[in-house]
Amino acid sequence: MANSASVLDFQSFSSQALSAETIDLIETSVAQFGAPLLMLDCDIIRAQYRALSNALPNVALHFALKPLPHPNVVKTLLEEGACFDLATTGEVELVQQQGVPAERTIHSHPIKRDRDIRDALAYGCNVFVVDNLNELEKFKPYKDEVELLVRLSFRNSEAFADLSKKFGCSSEQALVIIETAKDWNIHIKGLSFHVGSQTTNPQKYVDAIRSCKEVMDEVFERGLPALSTLDIGGGFPVTYTKQVMPIDQFCMPINKALNELPETVQVIAEPGRFIVAPAVTSVASVMGQAEREGQIWYYLDDGVYGSFSGLIFDHSEYPIVTLKQDGEFVPSVLSGPTCDSIDVIAENIMLPKLENGDLVIGRVMGAYTSATATDFNFFKRAQTIVINEFEENSQRMIG
Ligand SMILES: *Cc1c(COP(=O)(O)O)cnc(C)c1O
């Protein structure tokens, strides 16, 4: 599949239009592999990584595997020179299998079992995150090997996922952890935070960076060992059905805030969604249909227990289009295949009259979709096919 065009015409992925090449690629893929499918385009992984690298020129990007832990994503990003943010032993194994050097990884789960720490250390990853004294104590046996980041909490009710409810501590608690670590001879390397996934307002980062700077200043004033790293987390937004700020513009105030930090502070980030979300297009087919209370229901072979699980877990709304574009568009219901009533992808969606076997395309389906899919009711997860795996072979439609 290497010689194919990009699935997504980058300029128009939030609009309705699919290019002729894209339609052709979808149809030949379904003819070959059947439906449902997820089409992962490595060219878009490259483009997203480069766009964020350009927008944050002095920040080392560590791709967070959680939204799409796929070997080809890791491989593509490794070739781009990316670093990686790991949270579990499964993620450690995935990057290890792809040959990622351990120096290019950090482990950012704030709550770990001793086993998780040992597995990461055995691989060679020695940067970890803590947000409380109980967790800090777990590192006493490894104090000569590890460097720790202390995670601060900044609440964000506007994000898809407010990741500071469950993790992170206050500035005061961070200082207690840093002082205690000094007593226990454990090296604190710096601070981290996550402002929340799909954060559309860059001011959240600016406020968090300023608060971290205050903690760093206080650490200096108290004569504690200086902090050398700030990890600004993930959360960078992508356009689904609502347009978000272009990433350059989004990162401008963030860079400005970062410039106020001492030059000795090295800044890293943990983007997940931004790198992978636009890189996957889903293809489902109509299994059957019925008219209920005056509306037409189409039953697809993929649904909220499968690739559309993000509708529930991630609170996202994916742009959905049909390959068929002719005829009158009427309000319709798109349902998943399982026997459960919550398995509905879209209600009141304007669609032309579809036949069984017709294809329904989901866009921006790369983040928190297949990662949280299940095999409920024995409906197998959609198969992922990889396109534009090698850059030199690809016919780039973007950048
Ligand atoms: C999920 C997660 C990320 C990735 O967040 P995105 O919003 O997908 O960019 C990064 N860091 C940590 C600690 C996470 O839990």
Image (cartoon, rainbow, N blue to C red):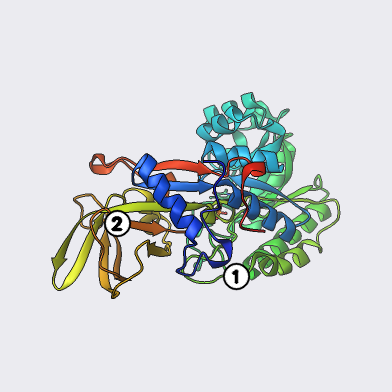
Q: What element carries label 1?
A: loop
Q: In this view, does 369 lie to the left or right of 260?
A: left
Above/below status of 28 relative to 315? above
In the rendered image, which quarter contains the C terminus?
bottom right
Q: Estimate the x, y position of residue 77 in percent, counting from the top left.
A: 64, 42
Front one among 14 and 255: 14
- Going from the N terminus, do you reach mark 1 or mark 2 first? 1
Front: mark 1 or 2: 2
Front one among 300 and 119: 300
Q: Is residue 328 left or right of residue 95?
A: left
Q: Which mark is residue 201?
A: 1
* Amino acid carrying mark 1 in the image: Asn
The residue that disc 2 covers is: 358
Q: Estimate the x, y position of residue 200 in percent, counting from the top left.
A: 57, 68
**Does mark 2 have its CB less than 8 Å from ligand 1?**
no
Q: Visible in this render: residue 50?
A: yes
Image point 26% across, 63% down: which residue? 354
Q: Is residue 202 left or right of residue 294?
A: right
Between the C-alphas of marks 1 and 2, the distance is 39 Å
Q: Estimate the x, y position of residue 347 in percent, counting from the top left.
A: 28, 68
Circle 2 packing at 10 Å, graded few (<14), some (14-19), many (20+), is: some
Q: Is mark 2 on a helix, strand or loop?
A: loop
* Amino acid carrying mark 2 in the image: Asp
Circle 1 packing at 10 Å, graded few (<14), some (14-19), many (20+), is: some
Front one among 160 and 284: 284
Image point 64% across, 54% down: which residue? 47
Front one among 332 and 137: 332
